Image (spheres, rainbow, N blue to C red):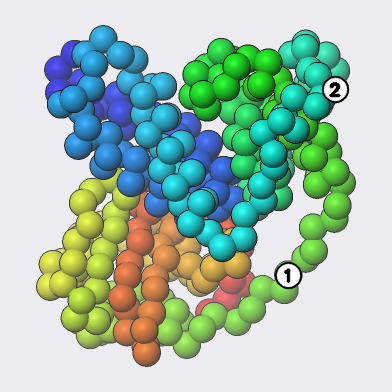
């Protein structure tokens, strides 16, 4: 396969890779950060990869290992002794309960997965959300097939308990002054006003492209100036204040942006225009008005 073909295949795997990583991390935003990092690591590792090795399991392993590194760095982690994985038998039969659990897992709120210990969480996502085979999961996670069955049984049992608890409704807050100003300037197409909000060391991440820093970030607004009618609305996802991006006369957002601020200045822009699967996986709440 040519280099262009390999790159195209890697890019085509990003949506399903995000589907896994977002649930593993409990966040569509954190999941995309892992996918982006994994993608860059895969590109760097391509010269040393075995030529006949399938790309998909190779890329999944890179992303899984990166997610594990991030999860280990978190202060609060749920752990489970490895021997407990074999305490519950599961013959892997596709019975009515298994089918019910698969349906439930697909519709479960993203953050709820983080309430499962990491290994059962990975197994449940791979089996019940992604539909992977026990053999694929065992190879990815360095487990025996029996070990996968044990983690799957324990994960499903924990998931049933998690899924029955009601989700607390959170009132939508008013937009912050910074976001309200950004939205107003953007919708007025005041690109110079937006550039004035940038910190000198501002960074821009458009997931399918390399990170940009410093003065080159100013070009971001010129790019949007050429897109025609684009409007923003304040929005929230996973408790984070973001902006929904509407193009043309669309009634639903096409993608979203997320900004990080420091004393009223923009320090980091994450623009998800080129990875629409992030919005598709998110529970985005758009403000009723600015």
User: Which residue shows up at 23% across the image and 22% down it?
Assistant: 49
Q: Nearer the viewer, residue 88 or 269?
A: 88
- In this figure, what is the number of numbered marks? 2
Comparing 35 with 215, the one in front is: 35
Q: CA distance from mark 1 to mark 2?
A: 32 Å
Q: Is 236 above or below relative to 266?
A: above
Q: Residue at x 29, y 54 (%)?
A: 206
Q: Where's the N terminus, which quadrant?
A: top left
Q: 10 Å neighbourhood of mark 2: few (<14), some, or many (≥20)?
A: few
Q: Is residue 33 visible?
A: yes
Decide which of tag 1 and tag 2 comes sooner along the chain: 2
Asked if residue 113 can be seen in this view, the reply is no
Residue 213 placement (x, y as % from top left): 18, 67
| Residue 116 in which image quadrant | top right
Residue at 78%, 39% (x, y): give it. 159
Q: Secondary structure at mark 1?
A: loop
Please name the residue shown 40% across and 62% down the image.
257
Task: Tell me whether the residue at label 1 lies in contact with that at label 2, contact meaning CB atoms closer than 8 angstroms.
Answer: no
- Examine the rendered structure and indicate whether residue 276 appears above or below residue 92: below
Instruction: Pinpoint residue 276: horizontal percent, then vertical percent.
Output: 42, 45
Q: Is residue 225 above or below residue 157?
A: below
Question: In the structure shown, which secondary structural element does the residue marked by tag 2 occupy?
Answer: helix
**Residue indicated by mark 1:** 170
Image vertical order of residue 97 relative to residue 210, above or below: above
* Residue 211 position in % (x across, y down): 22, 57
What residue is shown with label 2?
97
Which quarter of the figure has residue 174?
bottom right
Which numbered disc, 1 or 2, marks the residue closer to the eye?
Answer: 2
Left or right: residue 162 versus residue 201 is right
Residue 101, image x, y percentages: 78, 29
| Depth order, front residue of 1/145 | 145
């Amino acid at each position: 396969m040519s280099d262009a073909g390999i790159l195209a295949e890697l890019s085509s795997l990003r949506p399903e890779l995000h589907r896994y990583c977002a649930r593993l991390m409990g966040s569509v935003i954190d999941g995309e950060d892992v996918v982006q990092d994994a993608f860059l690591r895969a590109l760097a590792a391509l010269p040393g990869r075995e030529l006949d090795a399938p790309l998909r399991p190779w890329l999944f392993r890179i992303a899984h290992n990166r997610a594990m590194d991030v999860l280990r760095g978190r202060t609060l982690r749920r752990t489970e002794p490895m021997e407990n994985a074999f305490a519950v038998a599961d013959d892997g039969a596709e019975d009515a309960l298994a089918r019910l659990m698969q349906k439930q897992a697909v519709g479960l709120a993203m953050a709820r997965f983080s309430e499962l210990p990491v290994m059962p969480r990975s197994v449940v996502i791979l089996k019940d959300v992604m539909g992977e085979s026990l053999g694929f999961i065992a190879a990815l996670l360095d487990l025996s097939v029996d070990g996968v069955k044990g983690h799957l049984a324990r994960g499903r049992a924990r998931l049933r308990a998690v899924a029955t608890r009601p989700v607390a409704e959170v009132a939508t807050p008013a937009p912050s002054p910074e976001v309200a100003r950004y939205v107003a300037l953007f919708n007025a197409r005041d690109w110079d006003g937006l550039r004035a909000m940038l910190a000198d060391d501002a960074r821009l991440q458009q997931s399918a492209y390399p990170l940009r820093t410093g003065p080159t970030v100013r070009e971001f607004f010129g790019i949007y100036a050429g897109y025609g009618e684009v409007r923003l609305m304040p929005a929230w996802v996973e408790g984070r204040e973001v902006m929904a991006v509407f193009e043309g006369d669309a009634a639903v957002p096409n993608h979203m942006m997320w900004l990080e601020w420091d004393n009223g200045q923009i320090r980091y822009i994450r623009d998800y225009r080129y990875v629409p699967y992030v919005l598709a996986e998110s529970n985005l709440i758009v403000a009723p008005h600015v």
